[in-house]
Image (tube, grey):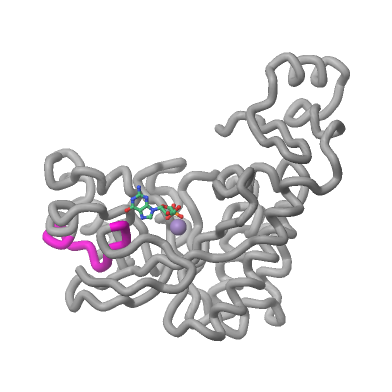
């Protein structure tokens, strides 16, 4: 759970505990009692106006070809350049849906000029936005090139009629991925519910896997399970040649991480 952030025109840091307590005592929103003190736009407004996407390649193991890029949101606003802080600020300001919509519009612009498949991150809040299911929405014309990543880091319990929503996304032509599998919010429950075309193994499972028999056992069992479910397995956060070789030998279909390339404004060249 992220700590609350203190938002002001040119300041973005953890809220002073005393301020949180005082606000809560006055019966204000216990999550963000200091929001009343924040100016209307400030850092968040500047971040919204300076959003851009970084692209990180995903390379297929058997022929080492780049098969897709993951789109990762960035902002030029120094106080909110960390995407986690940006999303947290959007939630505090009640602007999470507009942020998601703006990101999807920017990605649609890039889909026009950058070839190949795109992996796009969605949070539970995005799954609640009717625009996502609209055949006239910005991503809909590109659906066959888009994989929607749904993270394991956040619970999906608050999304009503989840299976109906996922079916609608598939009907529109999107493919679905579970992101960060192994970081585990809900174990393998999401794997059973989502029946994803793609599974992305969390970097925590990947880190040092060549030196760690326990991680290798877990990844071996996951690739086997994904093989049964016919899910394509991407290992994330691959940084070393040792990790790469271990993941290939354990049956991962594709890899992503600094070893191949860091996320860049223009899709970077890859040699691995
Ligand atoms: O969970 P998700 O896949 O959306 O996370 C992507 C984040 O992981 C991005 O912020 C990206 O910069 C970071 N990332 C991508 N590859 C690597 C890597 O090899 N090592 C580390 N430490 N971070 C990475
Ligand atoms: Mn992701």
- Report the predominant secondary structure element of the magenta stretch: loop
- Residue at 68%, 54% in the rendered image: 47
Quadrant assignment for the C terminus: bottom left
User: Picture coordinates of residue 117 (x, y %)?
Assistant: 43, 78
Figure check: 104 above or below 109? above
- The answer to which quarter of the image holds residue 116 is bottom left
Is 46 magenta? The answer is: no
Figure check: 136 above or below 212? below
- The answer to which quarter of the image holds residue 135 is bottom right
User: Picture coordinates of residue 235 (x, y %)?
Assistant: 29, 58
User: Picture coordinates of residue 178 (x, y %)?
Assistant: 43, 58
- Residue at 40%, 51% in the rendered image: 180
209 sits to left or right of 186: left
Quadrant assignment for the N terminus: top right
- Residue at 18%, 45% in the rendered image: 209
Figure check: 79 above or below 144? above
User: Picture coordinates of residue 186 (x, y %)?
Assistant: 45, 42
Region of the chain picked out in magenta, as a range = 248-258
Closest to the observer, 225 or 209: 209
Figure check: 137 above or below 34? below
Q: Looking at the image, how many numbered discs can be counted on the residues?
A: 0
Closest to the observer, 257 or 63: 257
């Amino acid at each position: 759970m992220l700590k609350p952030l203190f938002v002001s025109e040119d300041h973005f840091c953890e809220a002073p505990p005393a301020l949180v307590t005082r606000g809560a005592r006055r019966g204000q929103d216990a999550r963000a009692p200091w929001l009343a003190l924040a100016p209307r736009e400030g850092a968040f407004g500047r971040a919204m106006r300076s959003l851009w996407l970084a692209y990180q390649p995903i390379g297929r193991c058997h022929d080492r070809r780049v098969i897709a890029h993951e789109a990762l949101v960035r902002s030029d606003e120094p106080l909110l350049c960390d995407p986690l802080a940006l999303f947290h600020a959007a939630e505090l300001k009640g602007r999470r849906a507009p942020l998601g919509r703006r990101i999807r519009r920017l990605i649609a612009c890039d889909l026009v000029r950058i070839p190949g498949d795109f992996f796009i991150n969605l949070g539970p809040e995005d799954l609640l936005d009717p625009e996502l299911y609209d055949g006239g929405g910005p991503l809909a014309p590109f659906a066959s090139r888009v994989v929607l990543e749904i993270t394991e880091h956040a619970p999906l319990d608050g999304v009503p009629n989840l299976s109906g929503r996922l079916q609608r996304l598939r009907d529109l032509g999107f493919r679905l991925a579970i992101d960060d599998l192994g970081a585990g919010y809900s174990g393998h429950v999401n794997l059973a519910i989502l029946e994803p075309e793609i599974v992305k193994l969390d970097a925590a499972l990947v880190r040092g896997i060549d030196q760690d028999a326990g991680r290798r056992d877990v990844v071996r069992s996951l690739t086997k399970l994904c093989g049964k479910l016919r899910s394509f397995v991407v290992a994330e956060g691959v940084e070393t040649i040792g990790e790469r070789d271990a993941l290939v030998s354990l049956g991962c279909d594709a890899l992503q991480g600094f070893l191949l390339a860091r996320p860049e404004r223009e899709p970077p060249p890859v040699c691995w």
